Amino acid sequence: MSKYKLFLLRHGEGAWNKENRFCSWVDQKLSENGVKEAQDCGRLLKEQGYKFDQVFCSILSRSVQTAWLVQEAMGQEWVPVIKSWRLNERHYGSLIGLNRAEMALKHGEEKVKLWRRSYDITPPPIDESHPYFLEIYNDRRYNTCDVPKEKLPRAESLKQVLDRLLPYWESTVVPEIKKGKTVLISAHGNSCRALLKHLEGISDEAIAGVTLPTGIPVLLELDDNLRPVKPRQLLGDQEKIKAAIKKVEDQGKALPSK
């Protein structure tokens, strides 16, 4: 029997989503379309009568901005928001800033799919010669983390995302859910996929096939032990959701040469 409701949300489209680049820990605001996606998500949740008691998000602007816009559209701006780097997007290392389709043309679609979707393959790490290294590691938001800046990742597999997310989930999110609160986690494609893998017991192989489009809320109904009692629900127009999933999956395909 369903006891708790948990909502996962991949942030609205960011500027680099639109450009099909690996964004990762580079801080990007939402695109115009991403703002609309977040507002539409909030309106849908309001129409369906949902109310949140607690919101969690990462410390990246696109995640924070999405949470704000959803709350505003729901008329629930007052609901508390807690931010943590542990909900950040996966760290794509030296791939950050590169175009996925161009990478597929250069390295092959299968290699890019492994980098993007596999569970335990880590891309090459970022180093100080990378054009975005200083932009990330000189950002003072990373002075607020619960680990020293030099211990923060330089690249991550999805497994490593789950490893850094789980302690936060257990210590901070779970107690709020167990108080009977309805929780929204406004995060990223990979932090949400990692949590889904944990909650639903998805295999290392099958997680590669799980795609979350931007701005689409995912409802999980959980039992006493925080195990799903029914399949996850992606809320909204199902045809539009199918098209959005295909769009994400196609990002790693090589574009035909002109």
Image (cartoon, helix red, strand yellow):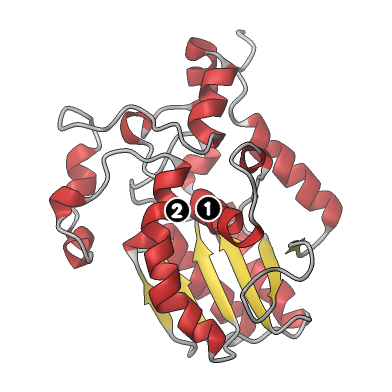
Residue 66 x, y percent position in the rendering: 51, 66
Residue at horizontal 64 percent and vertical 55 percent from the top: 201
Residue 91 x, y percent position in the rendering: 36, 43
Answer few, some or many: residues within 10 Å of disc 1's Cα (few below 14, many 20 plus, some between 14 and 19). Answer: many
Amino acid tagged 2: Leu
| Dot label at residue 194 | 1
Amino acid tagged 1: Ala
Q: How many marks?
A: 2
Q: Earlier in the sequence, mark 2 or mark 1?
A: 2
> In the figure, is residue 162 to the left or right of 243?
left
Label pair 2/1, CB-CB below 8 angstroms? yes
Q: CA distance from mark 2 to mark 1?
A: 5 Å
Q: Is residue 97 above or below residue 237?
A: above
| Dot label at residue 162 | 2
Q: Residue 72 versus residue 156: which sits nearer the camera?
A: 156
Answer few, some or many: residues within 10 Å of disc 2's Cα (few below 14, many 20 plus, some between 14 and 19). Answer: many
> In the figure, is residue 34 to the left or right of 146?
right
